[in-house]
Image: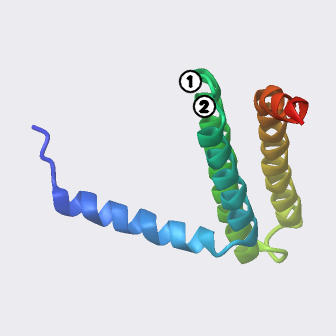
């Protein structure tokens, strides 16, 4: 029998919110939130197709989740580095490159989606 507990659910949400507060202190996460808000403003401004909105939201989510995972790895590696293993710095660099790769991919996808709309605005002038 499955028992649903609002108390456990509330506790889980409070842990998640506490974790979100921790990651929000990270400078890169704040920058990515600002870019995410800018994309949402553009979504509201332009008449996008549903699939374009879905792709943009998926890319925003991917970049933010990867940044959270990157922050987790950085904290773990800071505990271990360098006395446990010399690869600690390499792991941090690799995670940063994963976030950068996703961010660049999101940028180019956003460019492909928004370019026709920007082009229309520029042609009006």
Residue 56 versus residue 44: which sits nearer the camera?
44
> Residue shown at 81%/25% (left/top)?
116
> Residue shown at 62%/29% (left/top)?
47
> Residue shown at 68%/68% (left/top)?
76
Locate residue 77, reporting x and y percent.
74, 68
Residue 5 versus residue 77: which sits nearer the camera?
5
The answer to whether residue 23 is left or right of residue 99 is left
Q: Relative to 54, does residue 42 appear above or below in the rendering?
A: below
Residue, disc 1: 50
Locate residue 5, reporting x and y percent.
16, 55
Q: CA distance from mark 1 to mark 2?
A: 5 Å
Residue 48 versus residue 10: which sits nearer the camera?
48
Residue, disc 2: 53
Which image quadrant: the N terminus?
top left
Residue 52, quarter of the rendered image: top right
Locate residue 83, reporting x and y percent.
82, 77
Residue 20 versus residue 88: which sits nearer the camera?
20
Mark 1–mark 2 CB contact (< 8 Å): yes
SS assignment at label 2: helix
Locate residue 2, reporting x and y percent.
14, 40
């Amino acid at each position: 029998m499955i028992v649903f507990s609002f108390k456990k659910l509330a506790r889980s949400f409070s842990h998640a919110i506490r974790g979100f507060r921790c990651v929000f202190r990270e400078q890169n996460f704040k920058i990515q939130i600002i870019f995410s808000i800018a994309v949402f403003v553009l979504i509201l401004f332009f008449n996008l197709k549903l699939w374009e909105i879905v792709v943009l939201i998926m890319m925003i989510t991917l970049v933010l989740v990867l940044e959270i995972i990157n922050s987790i790895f950085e904290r773990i590696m800071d505990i271990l580095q360098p006395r446990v293993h010399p690869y600690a710095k390499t792991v941090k660099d690799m995670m940063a490159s994963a976030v950068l790769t996703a961010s660049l991919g999101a940028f180019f996808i956003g460019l492909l989606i928004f370019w026709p709309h920007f082009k229309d605005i520029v042609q009006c002038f």
